[in-house]
Amino acid sequence: MKDLWFVLLLQNGMTLDRAGLPVEFEDGYLVSLDKYGTKLPVVALTPELFELLLENYCFIAETLWRSEDTPHYVGVWVHDSFVYIDINRWFEDRDEALEFARENGQLAVWDCANKREIWVE
């Protein structure tokens, strides 16, 4: 997982499956859950701490996947000198994704096809 640290810095973000492997979605929408999230300054996040956090978040994604029988993923991105790590769900339907985002206090959903945010109104 240490190699993912360098990928993160180069790409400014990634989505991982419950095994910690990068995944790419060609369509659909990713939405973060409100109960899980970490925000750290980039300068404070060492490769070792990053690996530990990813292991913990992959465990959470696995546990949620099994308990809810719904796929959960780990989202990681860099914005304004901070690294964000959270748990995401994938939705095929835009309206369903936006509703879930509202219920979870999210400001936006990630549009996988267009690689951009859709702001929640």
Image (cartoon, rainbow, N blue to C red):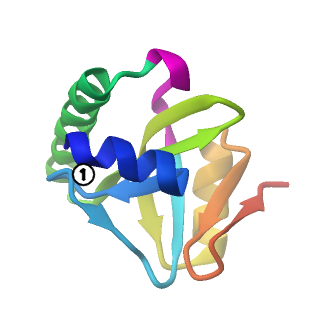
Magenta span: helix, strand or loop, mainly? strand
Q: Quadrant of residue 41?
A: top right
Query: Which residue is painted at 51% across and 57% down in the image?
Result: 11
Single out the residue that lies furthest toward the top.
Answer: 44
User: Above or below — where is 95 with respect to 7?
Assistant: below
Q: Residues within 10 Å of mark 1 (few under 14, many from 20)?
A: few
State the residue at coordinates (61%, 63%).
110
Residue 86 figure quarter: top left
Q: Position of residue 104 (x, y in %)?
A: 59, 41
Q: Residue at x 58, y 54 (%)?
A: 100
Can you say whether 25 is above or below 59 in the image?
Answer: below
Q: Give the camera-side residue of 54 and 94.
A: 54
Disc 1, SS? helix
- Image quarter where the N terminus lies is top left
Of 5 and 121, nearer the camera is 5
**Is residue 64 in sight in this rendering?**
no
Q: How many marks?
A: 1
- Amino acid type, callout 1: Glu
Could you tell me residue 72's position as x and y percent?
Answer: 31, 54
**Magenta region:** 33-44
Q: Is residue 94 magenta?
A: no
- In which quarter of the view is residue 107 placed? top right
Relative placement, left or right, of 80 versus 56 is right
Residue 118 higher or lower than 56, as above or below: below
Q: Percent position (x, y) of residue 46? A: 35, 22
Q: Is residue 116 visible?
A: yes
Residue at which label 1 appears: 68
- The quadrant of the rendering that contains the C terminus is bottom right
Point 23% across, 32% down: residue: 51
> Is residue 38 rendered magenta in the image?
yes
